[in-house]
Image (cartoon, rainbow, N blue to C red):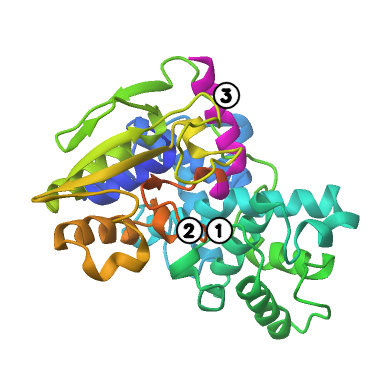
Amino acid sequence: MSCKNILEKLIKNGKLTSTLSKSKTKKTEVEEFQKILHQLGFDKELKWANYGADGYYGGSCTKAVKAFCKKNDIESDGSTVTKEIAKSILLRYDILDELQDLHLDIKNNSKKLNQIYRRGSSHKGAVASLQTLLNALGYGRKLNWSKYKNDGAYGKSTAAALKGFMDKHKLAGDSDELNIQSAKEICKILGQKFGANWHENSKADTADVANSLVDFSASNFQGKKVKADINFIDSLTKINQYAKLNKVKIHITSSWRANAKVAGAIVKPAKKSNHMAGHAIDMNIVFVGGWANSKYLKRKNEAHWDSSVAGFINAIRKDKDLRWGGDFRTQDPVHIDDGLNIKNPKEWEKRYLATQQD
């Protein structure tokens, strides 16, 4: 289980403050929490060079939590982690990769920056990072985030969000492309919410090659056997829960794939498909008295869906960690994934390598 998942689990189970509080007892959860604080850049406060992630919530960990809270306008002495603090940490953690990517592009690709981040760009991963950062800065409405999220398409919405940011901070230039001044300002503003070493510490864990590709089965899954990356299992479990709640069965037609060659595919597979990293499924939905295939599930037919199908699809839509392919610009209504290839291209590469070697 990842550092992030452990923190989310403590929030869900109501064991957050009892587990993450100043104590002389060594705890695995504290060790994982210290890794997050390290990745967020609080090395000095943690005395990371001396202690690393030692599992003790002592003076150094307290100082790191207090420093984070001060930067994020939360009143705390750092001696315990409240739900408010944990949720704020997760919000920062979720944009760290994107912020680091933009920082590296400023450093290494400054002359090509406006070619990478521009309207119509083919660099979808980079554009998705920019969209994520603009959303974190409060421009979600202009991005039409609720509908498209970070889809990697630099169009009218992304340009409008960037223009809003540039106007607010009195930055010159054309919002159809990201210039170096605007990029630096984005990093400066968001970087203030992190520790001093935020641009140095990668949050990517080492790929677990052993047993990374696993079989998954659940009460409301049927059809082909599901093969998935071990890091996608929590998402599959949620999908099954949504199916169970809405009294439908998920008939699997495809999951992990060795390559992008798929006979009879509804939509041409992407070269960096989430299927190839074990983070996607294709399916039909079986409901009482019917079968929802790609034709049935098209958005234009939504008004005629059975209520159980609508309930299931809407549960996927509302889940911030999942995507339904019917909402893609190029519709793929039998597809569900977690958007790993767009949200975190580096992690996609690692999970791809890990699952392909199994």
* Percent position of residue 238, x then y: 26, 44
Query: Could you tell me which residue is drawn at 32 percent across and 32 percent down?
Result: 25
Q: Check the image and report above or below for 322 versus 120.
A: above
Tell me whether the residue at label 3 lies in contact with that at label 1, contact meaning CB atoms closer than 8 angstroms. Answer: no
Left or right side of 248 for 216: right
Q: Disc 2 or 3, which lies upstream in sequence? A: 2
Secondary structure beneath dot 1 equals loop
What stretch of residues is rendered in magenta? 342-358
**Looking at the rendered structure, which numbered label has been put on residue 353?**
3
Tell me whether the residue at label 2 lies in contact with that at label 3, contact meaning CB atoms closer than 8 angstroms. Answer: no
Secondary structure beneath dot 2 equals loop
Magenta segment includes 19: no
Q: What is the spatial separation of the Cα atoms under label 2 and label 1, in whole angstroms?
A: 8 Å
Choose top left, top right, bottom left or bottom right for residue 305. Answer: bottom left
Left or right side of 238 for 106: right
User: Which residue is disc 1 drawn over?
Assistant: 151
- Does the rendering let one see residue 131? yes
